[in-house]
Amino acid sequence: MNLKKTLFATLFIFFLFIVSGYSQIEEPVKWKFSAEKEGENLYNLIIEASVDDHWHLYSQYFEMGGPMPLYIEFEESDKYRLIDSVVEYPEPKVEFDEIFNIEVKHFSGGAKFIQKIEVLTDNKFNINGFLDGQACYDDGKCIQISTDFIFPVNGGEAINEISTGKTVSATTPIIVTENIYENADKENRSLFGFFLISILFGLISILTPCVFPMIPMTISFFMQKSSSKFNTFFKAFVFGISIMLLYTLVGVIVSLTSAGADFTTVLSSNWIPNFIFFALFVVFAASLFGLFEIVLPTGLANKADKQVDKGGILSSFFLAVTLVIVSFSCTGPIIGALLVQAASGNVLEPTIGMLGFGFGFALPFTLLALFPSWLKKLPKSGGWLNSVKVVMGFIILAFSMKFLSNIDQNYHLGILSRDLYIAIWIVIAVLMGIYLLGKIKFSHDSDVNHVGFFRLLLAGSSFVFAIYLIPGLFGANLTSIAGLLPPKTSQKFDLTVLNYPNTDTDKENNSICETPSYTDILHMPYQVQGYFDWNQGLECAKSQDKPMLLYFTGHSCSNCKVMQAGIWSDKTVQDYLNNKVVVTALYVDEKTIEVPENDRFTSLNDGKLKKRLGEINADIQIVNFKNNTQPFYVLISPDGKVLTEPMIYNTDPQKFIGFLKNGIENFEKE
């Protein structure tokens, strides 16, 4: 398989992963769990999978580097021990995967997975565990599957209904008793801002070497002598609208299959999509650097081009199709980067993003078709076009680090600290500045005989940005780009801690009642003190008779980090947070912490058992506040009354102080 086909297949798999991997619409694999006694002190834990027609489930045992194998984990206990590994029945089918170049194993129809154990006690008990895996359809569509399970042993009674995964006991804790606010302003502002950014991406795409030279050839289509002015105008309008529709269609597909209250949290926090996104960004950057080209099959362009030759209004549509296909080698990485970023945010963003991109991409072509005399004012094609591609490659390479950071933060690996991340960005910015000065040359670059004013301005901006980043190595907030950086709590070397007040000096009013749980993993930034467990925070608020500040956040939440850098660093805000309210930071994407059994519950939202801290916090937010965006601040009284309208993303410290003051005053009036 040649490089072009491999890249196209990779992009196709990426697209399928986005549009179907986490849709939660299909459940092709049904699970059944049972424990059978085999002999004295011996049990077989049996996991049965029923697989729908045309689907297949991957085995546990094949070489890594391709599809996701099935992973089964049993919770450790001194009440039993595992004997050997999980046995699979029947033998899985073995196939060579040409895309990943490895042999894979999978099951069709159904399979059994049997783990033998030796029981070390006569008492009743349950064996808990979970499984993760991947199932794929015959056409290549794949989805991730995961579920928790419980096996009752020695007559134990599972708290789950094993066949459905739903508990028969406790439900989502309702911590709010009245006055629940809803606010969508942040979402609307966010979508509008993303729309404008997408338009900018579309306009920039024009300045690439596989699009810009096509402008005169494309516009000549609308300048045929036989065409009237009205006909030319109408054909140009159809041409522009067609480009927008083609790009928007991709966004609509992604948006429609990205539904689900916790879709964005799953997508932005799970290591699999984040690693795929990181790898794709690196591939996109390599393509823009000139290592290879990402192209669609040429047959598509040839077929569309034949339709253009037939003339008529319909030919404008096929001209738009031809342009989109031919320009894909330059626009593909930009579209991919835009979709990746969109799929990690609001579920409407893919549609909004592609609509904006299509509008920005189509606008110059449409205007030049209407006013062809403007063509004379355009600069001639040249080496500067490739420079635009390379600069975009540097930028995309820098953004790829964000997805690695998400993995590092969500799984607490402690590898990519904030200062190391910033150091990498400094190197990329310096290299981009040196390139713009003509000191680095890529394969498709022309010789830089002299540096023009605009090129010098961009090079200077790169060096200025690198210098701006340097204080961040020592703990500076870098508030303007805080959302793109790892959180301040991951900083290894921080000189700024010397500037924060010692909150331990005010013992009388300090909000801490007892040592917070989970502080070995979770940390409050900017010397703020508080809790990470809603129940612990609520008990402290009751004992001190103070309002409780619920702060819904996430390791992967960019706006949360921006708001912390701009507001939590303010000393007045710190005084409020440390002395006048009880802060409880609820991480909705925390995956590594399992709460004690008595704190687990079944969701009123989706009917699933919640046992990990992140899914518990996300469920509390969705059920109590009908909201799943972060950051989200709520001030409540110890008896569960919302004291003021919740605070969403805002970087003005005075507005945040006003939010706190208003809630505290309402609390004191009660």
Image (cartoon, rainbow, N blue to C red):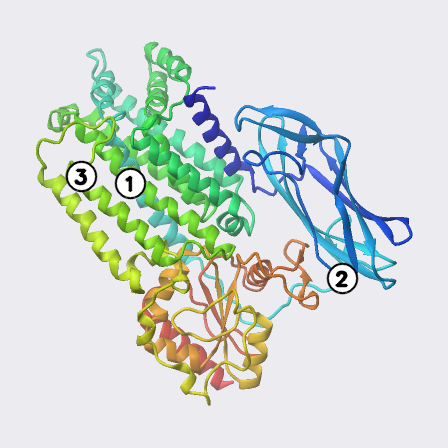
Disc 3 residue type (three-letter): Leu
Q: Where is residue 202 in the image (x, y as percent from the top left)?
A: 30, 36
The numbered mark, 2 or 3, whose residue comes first in the sequence reads: 2
In the rendered image, the vertical position of residue 77 relative to residue 332, given as above or below: below
Can you see residue 226?
yes
- Residue at screen point 36% across, 61% down: 562
What's the CA distance linking mark 2 and mark 3?
A: 63 Å
Disc 2 residue type (three-letter): Asp
In the rendered image, the vertical position of residue 499 relative to residue 216, given as above or below: below
Query: In the rendered view, does 552 fall on the left or right side of 143?
Result: left
Q: Residues within 10 Å of mark 2 (few under 14, many from 20)?
A: few
Q: Nearer the viewer, residue 311 or 364?
A: 364
Can you see residue 350?
no
Residue position marked by numbered label 2 in the rendering: 78
In the rendered image, the vertical position of residue 308 relative to residue 201, given as above or below: above
Q: Where is residue 145 in the image (x, y as percent from the top left)?
A: 64, 42
Q: For residue 394, which numbered disc appears in the image?
A: 1
Q: Where is residue 271 in the image (x, y as percent from the top left)?
A: 51, 47
Tag nearer the camera, 2 or 3 = 2
